[in-house]
Amino acid sequence: MNDRPTDLLALEERWRSHGMPVDNPPRSEDAELVRAFLDAWEALVDESGEPDRVALLNGLLLRFSSAPLVTDHDGSGWHLHYRPDDASLGETLAASVSVATAEHLTRNGMHRIGRCALVECRRAFADLSRPGRQRYCSHPCANRDAVRRHRRSRDAAAPGAP
């Protein structure tokens, strides 16, 4: 969502770069499917009310995933798939991210996704912090904001400051 792929080749390259296998190639309709999925996932990130966030999450699961099936299709060992075996790359991405989001939020708390607090950033992130109060997408953003706050307080405390 933070850096949307520009085309199907970029989508496939990004998927592979994260160590994910491509069981079925992307289809031409995947571009629109992934765009719609990312728009829906972005709405989920921006929803702060827990019941509304759950409703959006359930909508993603209903729309993009299927009942789990046990498979060893690639010889990597038995595992669950939440999509049909013939799912395209876009369908696989949408199902995988929907289920992974549901697993993360139900295991760790519905508040565990958000947007970076740095005004000029606003990237989405999954909160993996121990206390569950992550505010920034990365250490550089947190540091940039801390320096900004420090300079503001220093300048306010300086002699002759208004």
Image: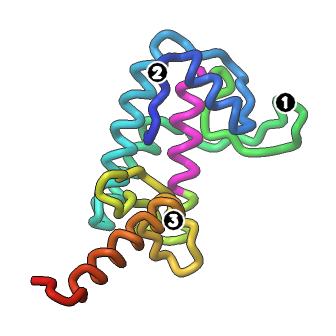
Of tags 3 and 2, which is closer to the observer? 2
Please state the horizontal and vertical placement of residue 67, each as a whole percent of the image. Answer: 58, 42
Mark 2 lies on residue:
6
On the picture, is 48 further left or further right than 34? left
In the image, is residue 78 part of the stretch drawn in magenta?
no
Give the secondary structure at mark 2.
loop
Please state the horizontal and vertical placement of residue 21, each as a whole percent of the image. Answer: 74, 30
Does 142 sit above or below residue 27? below
Residue at point 43%, 24% (across, down): 33
Please state the horizontal and vertical placement of residue 120, each as a whole percent of the image. Answer: 31, 52
**Residues in magenta?**
87-102
Mark 1 lies on residue:
74
Q: If you read the primary sequence from the N terminus, does the residue marked by circle 1 or circle 3 appear first?
A: 1
Mark 3 lies on residue:
127
**Type of the residue with mark 3:** Asp
Q: Residues within 10 Å of mark 3 (few under 14, many from 20)?
A: many
Give the secondary structure at mark 3.
loop
The answer for how far apart the CA atoms under marks 1 and 3 are is 31 Å
**Type of the residue with mark 1:** Asp
Quarter of the figure that contains the N terminus: top left
Magenta segment main secondary structure: helix
